[in-house]
Amino acid sequence: MPQTGNILVIGAGIAGMKASLMLAGASNKVYLVEKLPIIGGKVIKNEESFPNLECSTCMVAPIQQDVLQNPNIETLTYSVVEKIEGSAGDFSVVIRKKARYVSLTDCIGCGMCYEPCPVSLKNEWEENLIDRKAIYVPCSGSLPNVPVIDSEHCLKLLGKEECNLCVESCAFEAINLDDSDEVMEIKVGAVILATGSATIDLSTLPNLGYGTLPGVYAPMEFERLFASNGPTLGEIVLRGSEKIPESIAVIHCAGRKEKKYCSAVCCMYSFKFARFLKHKIPSAHVFNIYSDICVPGKSYQSFYKSVDGADTEMLYTSSIEDVKVSENESGLKVAYPDAAGAMEELNVDMVILAAALVPGDDAAPLAEVAGVDLDSRGFIATVLDGSGSMETSRRGVFVAGTAEGPKDIQNSVIQAESAAGQVMGIVTSGVSGS
Amino acid sequence: MTDTERKGAVLPVAKEPGDTVLDFLRMAMTKEAADAVILPMKVPSGDSYAWILMNDISLLDDAVPIVPTMPVQGAKALRSLTRKGPGNLKVIAVMRPCEIRAAMELSKLGQVHSENLILATYDCPGAVQLQKYVDDPAGGDERFSGMLKKGNPDDSAKSVCHYCENFSIFDSDIHFGYLGLSEKEVLLVPGSGKGTEFLEELGLDLKKDLSSWEKGIEEIRADRVKTRKNSFEETEIQLRDIDGLLSVFANCIGCHNCQSACPICYCRLCYFDSETAEQDPDALITAAEKRGGISLPVDRIMFHTGRMAHMSLSCVSCGQCSDACPVSIPVADVFSYVADQTQNTFEYIAGLNDGDPLPLRQFRKAELPGVHELVKDADAEVPSHE
Amino acid sequence: MLMRRYHLMSSITIDTSASRKIKELLKFLLESGKIDAAVTMRKIPENNSYDLALITNASNLDEAVPVVPVMTVNAGQVLSSISTSGKKMAVVLKPCELRAFVELVKREQGSFENLLTISHTCGGVFPLELVEKGQIEELLPKYEKNVSKGEVPANTRDTCRACEHFIPMNADITVSVAGECESGKGCMMYFNTEKAEKFTEGFAGERSEQKFDPSVLQKTLDARLAEKEKLFSSTKKDGPGLDGLLDLFGKCVGCHGCSNVCPICYCLLCDFESANFDYNLPYFEEHLSRRGALRLPPDTIFFHLGRLTHMSFSCVGCGMCSDVCPVGIPVAAVFKKTGEKTAAIFDYVPGRDVEESIPVMVYKEEELSDIG
Amino acid sequence: MKDFEMRESGQDKKLRAKVGVYVCECGPNIAGKVDLDKILADLSELDDYQDVELVVKKYGFLCSGPGKEFLEEEIKSNGFTHLVVGACSPRDHDSTFMSICEKTDLNPYLYRIINIREHCTWVIDDKEKATEKAFSYIRGGIARVLRQSELFEKPLDINPDVLVIGGGISGMEAALSLSGEDRRVFLVEKTDRLGGVSIDLSGLLPGQGEVVKKKMESVTEDKNIRLFLNTRVETVIGFLGNFEIELVSKENAETTEIMAGAIVVATGSELFEPANSDNYSYSESDEVYTSISIEKMFSGEGEAKLRSGMKPSSVALIHCVGREEKNYCSGICCSYMMKLAGFFKNQSPDIQVTEFYRDLCLPQKDDQERYNEAEADGVTFIRIKDISTKGTDVSFEKMNGEKGEQSFDMVVLAPAMEPSADTEELADLLTVPLDESGFFQEVHKMTNPVGTSTDGVFIVGTAHGPKGVSDSMQFARASAGQILTRLIPGEKLIPEVKVTEILEAYCTGCGNCLDVCVYGAIYSDDSRGISVVNEAVCRGCGNCFGSCPSGALRTKHFTNTQLYREVDEALR
């Protein structure tokens, strides 16, 4: 049975990239498959990351550059894994490289083709806060800086119109409208699943008013509002009214009751939001409505203490699940039971919900393809051998990052490097053993 | 720093305070409490002195411990001896307080290792300006003995001596005190643990009450502080702006004597002499073209302000730089004035032997209180343009 | 000392003082764009001090005093840092400054390529002490009278009074100041080289073929040689050897100012300041046990011996070293005397000719025969 | 025999240099924004240097495949001594052009990339000004490249073996993940047994207790792991790949010298001393225990009994002991306290268990479930604003301000986890700084939590900070992963090339640079009284460069002369 040093990593977020770099560093060949047109995952969507509020892009861009320039890593963006067969040390994998319609080698990302494109639709990467064209890159500073044509909306590809505007605008003949998907087969010795997670669909929580009340924001929406390369270039303005909010309530543990677990990171990013708001709008009043504070580890509580009282007013509620958000004439009304259980009311312009982290909607199909079990919460399960092993129920297939459950960047990176460490244990012993 | 409950010992009276010191040193060497001493001796031409390390007791007869002028700063002699380590010779060095203070600063820079040194100081009435002494040695000796009697410098002394506050016991191991006392009486005061041990080893009983001597010293210090304030006010007017600075250093010919005479300037090759600071010929002339002409050699003010930036925190205002200047620029007054301010900003006293590291080599969270206010005011004025 | 024979050169007679004439020449050269910059002494009225200046704009020439008995810094030393720029420059140099620069060019420290050298017969300069006290103005009239009469002016630098090379040897343009100019006969400006001719094309004053007649300065030369005899005998303390040296250099404070201002000392880091002269403790302990006493810091006298061996044969006797010595040691006199003695063995005159190689740098089969 | 000159006369010996200047059009990004031909023309007429020949050309995409071949061919055919490329940010293609130089015999450090895209064409709209700026940037670049000197990589042999300090669960896991035929592991433990703290923990997950024992067996049996019990580390000198370590045995004070390529610090942590907090006062005889002593009872005899031998009928479990004093939450106490609650309930079903907590921190996967089970089991959870105990009497204040008093048979305190005793001493030894909580300082909180500023020293387990057993073991495997990629047996290590050197002639050993060197790359050579840079450790950050008053320090590739000449030329 041939033992091969190749490794498949699915998902190019912080966990996927760190695992790939470590494995490539030990001169293994890594196939890094990412479903989006760009790499970087969730972290690059936040302007700054806790606890020391370091600029996320400055932290991640060098890692992205290392991945793109590493000879041992073959990065396949805009691609999905369709089949993983075989067993540890000898998996055969089928990967579908979706048609990008723009050549990765010829295009230099000059952006001349975006403007002429007549089609305009919501940009999901920017949480639909801004529009994008049919030919687009998700955000400025995308890596690789090469656009992709959205075949479900491009008039030419849908056969509606003979539109060639983007092709004509390209000085480098980098656009080829009759590009097609490509399927490739590879042999790998191990697989690491690093497909990340999603936030709960807040519209399923009726009494918080997300989706019906425009002033209620999901956490990622606020992150993009605050981002300097985001839809509003960092200006915090309310949807529709374009007004700068004067009072904001951040409600913790949105969806915790329903999901029956604490998502570990929401307290910290809620405090981060308070710091952002006070920094951008010094005159604003910020409130954090909480029932529990989860700031584990040696450096998180000091950040919480620095925010408490300075950037925000902490309001304790005896039961977070009974918090209700409704509309009133001046904006939003937040009702919550205080320590003694009596209902208190707070009038604010804006509400931000610290939403629970849930498995991505592609988690179940991926588990299917990878032949691995999910845990009770729908995340990818690991073999609970008591030593924190990152191996899944299927030998030779590992998981790392928030695909295994909610965690912060530090633990995602540790899990990625720990999984890579375990893979190197098998592969090297495998290779040297054979 | 005098502290009240400290006690001293009275030394047997001799002709001059200097002779009392020599008797003490002879006694110390015969008792093998020290292997050698460092003392000034007259040079053959008789018009200057040099530091001599000697272990032959007979040579002490020609030594002049309390020396009228300061040809070479004592700290430079100590540096040349102990830069590469303390060695195993026990040596007593008898020098002026500003020389020992300079040696303390150098020990913080790894240039002096004083483990096996007994640093002795004496009450310094001031020192005759070097050129004046060399021109007329006999006159210089006479003026100096006058100063010894009065306890204050006369007009032949260096300008810095007129406002020197640290002319008596500062932080040396042992100190010979005599200013303000009755004729020829010399007190021997321990300044550090090492000093006390050394004196006890020699069997001296330290019981003499020092309060009257200390009171005399305080009186002298009080009016030195006044002179210091006036002198700094004058220098402040001179240095009110860049033109003031330029006019003070107008005659400077860039010979860097002041840097070589300074005990704190320990660099082997001064940055301003190295090729990095040397101007590229084309760049020099392009700069000249911008102004229509430049004075040569270039960068004289840069050299002085640069040297200030590097050493002013350790400046003990010993006045050697003015003595070495061929065109008599009052370099010492300018550097003392600046050092006074920089050292106050860091609440740092140059030359203290309490192991307080150099301000620029340590980081303290709460530092430079004054500066924080400045920054805050500056921030307040600037509208936050977020 | 054999006076050099001079060939026929085109020259002009000067109606005003040498200083003003050279200033006119500099103005002409700057305004005509023939040169990019001029180097000359300058008087700064407000604090009545002098300095050497590099002037690129003709309007700044008014404070220039090209011929003045003051030397704040040896121009040869300064030239070594600016002569290698691509710019054309006219430089007014005293004979010893020009000779110092020649010695530096022999040591790769500069080049004549873009320089137009203007020099003049020199009456000697006053020590810095007098310059700093601002007494130059009062001393000038008496100085100029002495110089024009070929007498040695009083209280100038001792090596200037004893200087017999007061006639510039190889300048492009020479102005005869001493002995001729003020004696009513009007002094001459000689254009010695084609470069001089090329640069001064179109400069006022009709040209005439003249030969420089050194005999006019014979009187000055004899007076200088007599002064030299007096100076050299005064430096002979009671016998040579260490005692003599100790008498002379005993009071040296080791500030090395003499080497900093010496134009010939071009080393970035003098060997005597480097790690080679940094002794560890066993050295001191061993010497102390042997000799009972030793001077700290060590090598104060050894430094002067070292400098003598490294550069004295190139010493041009400009006197800067004595001027900056804080304890007034007659360094210049000792170096000039020793230098001339050593150079004489190789019949070498420092700064005479840029092609003449430095004695210690060249191996000649027949050499030092009188010593062998 | 002819007289020959010891040295040629000065004039004709000038430096001959031939500099290739290639400006990349970068499609419209550069060509479209500046007058490229004017730049090329001005550059070719540059007369700054009579002794330098400039070859000035432009090309469409120098970073494209054909572009790279074109440049390689140009270097070879022209025989350039220096190369300047006017293009994009060094971050994009510095390494691309350096690898092209490596293919020719032009030393890659005699080349410079000048960023005229991000610095000029992308930020200046006025074409004329952008042209002027691009030209002056390239002119400065030429001046600088001419003063650059060749630098060479100096590959170093490495020792693949690893020293692991601390025989707890993370130390053992790191040792087992690293040991192999071609890599020995030296496992040093200061006590007389392996297992550390975790040996007494029955673990949160079923079977976790046995994991520790299994690991101990495999460590003792592994022939590639050399175990040193009752031993401490005396001295550590060296850098990644070449550490010289002295171990001292506590029994017979005998020292052993070992060589290792990397060091894993797994020295674990200790519990905060409750007496240091004025909320809890109790004496030896009171029935007040810390959580670890209860864990020992349960994993030992399987029961937790009072001193009287009786089983307690009421227990108070108090969380967050010392959290205010330490100003951090240890993150796992809530989980293990609820586990202990479960053990007490199994021990005596009708036992009354009350848990007092400030915040419930349940971030781990099955924490919430464990909380729900405990609540279902009848454990009372009281969230408190303030609490204090006298022996087993507990007085507390709830969130709604209600005050309460209750006494219990037994009180169990969950103290915060703090750094182990010899952390400070070991930190000095390894020149690794400590962070504000007193734990070892990781080099980057998020992207490299196991690395430290001293390359080759890694921190795992609770030495890095409070964490559970499985997290500790993941940290251990992550450090093993980094070591497996950095120290590959047989391969060489290439340290940083652009390092700093100290000129012995100028240095007087004052030690300014020693203080500012974060990587401990400078040591003082007492015999010569000077400071010396260890070029294998130096990262070329240049901190020391600024601290030296006499300029005795030179950072290769960034010398003062190079920088000043570049600026002078650019501003002409």
Image (cartoon, rainbow, N blue to C red):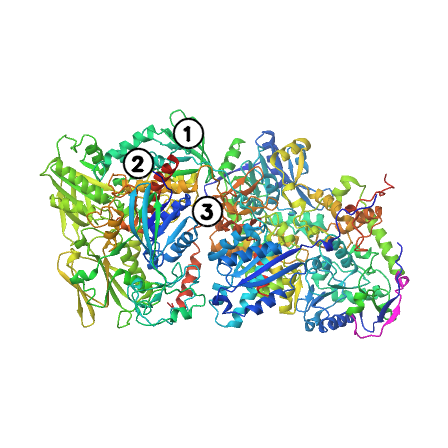
Contact, mark 2 vs mark 3 (Cβ under 8 Å): no
Give the image location of residue B213, x and y in percent.
Answer: 52, 45
- Lower position in the chain sequence, tag 2 or tag 1: 2
Q: Identify the residue position indicated by label 2 in the image.
A: D169
Residue B158 visible within the image: no
- Lower position in the chain sequence, tag 1 or tag 3: 1
Q: Identify the residue position indicated by label 3 in the image.
A: D518
**Tag 3: Cα neighbours inside 10 Å, few (<14), some, or many (≥20)?**
some
Q: Is residue A431 above or below residue C93?
A: above
Q: Secondary structure at mark 2?
A: helix
Seen from this angle, which residue lies furthest right? C215
Subunit ID for the residue under disc 2: D
Which tag is nearer the camera, tag 2 or tag 1? 2
Contact, mark 1 vs mark 3 (Cβ under 8 Å): no
Q: Are marks 2 and 1 on the same chain?
A: yes
Quadrant housing the N terminus of chain A: top left
Q: Secondary structure at mark 1?
A: strand
The kind of residue tagged 2 is Ile
The kind of residue tagged 3 is Val
Q: Secondary structure at mark 3?
A: loop
Q: Is residue B362 left or right of residue C181?
A: left
- Main secondary structure found in the magenta portion: loop
Subunit ID for the residue under disc 3: D
Q: CA distance from mark 1 to mark 3?
A: 28 Å
Q: Identify the residue position indicated by label 1 in the image.
A: D248
Point 70% across, 52% down: residue: C266
Q: Is residue B17 above or below residue D75?
A: above
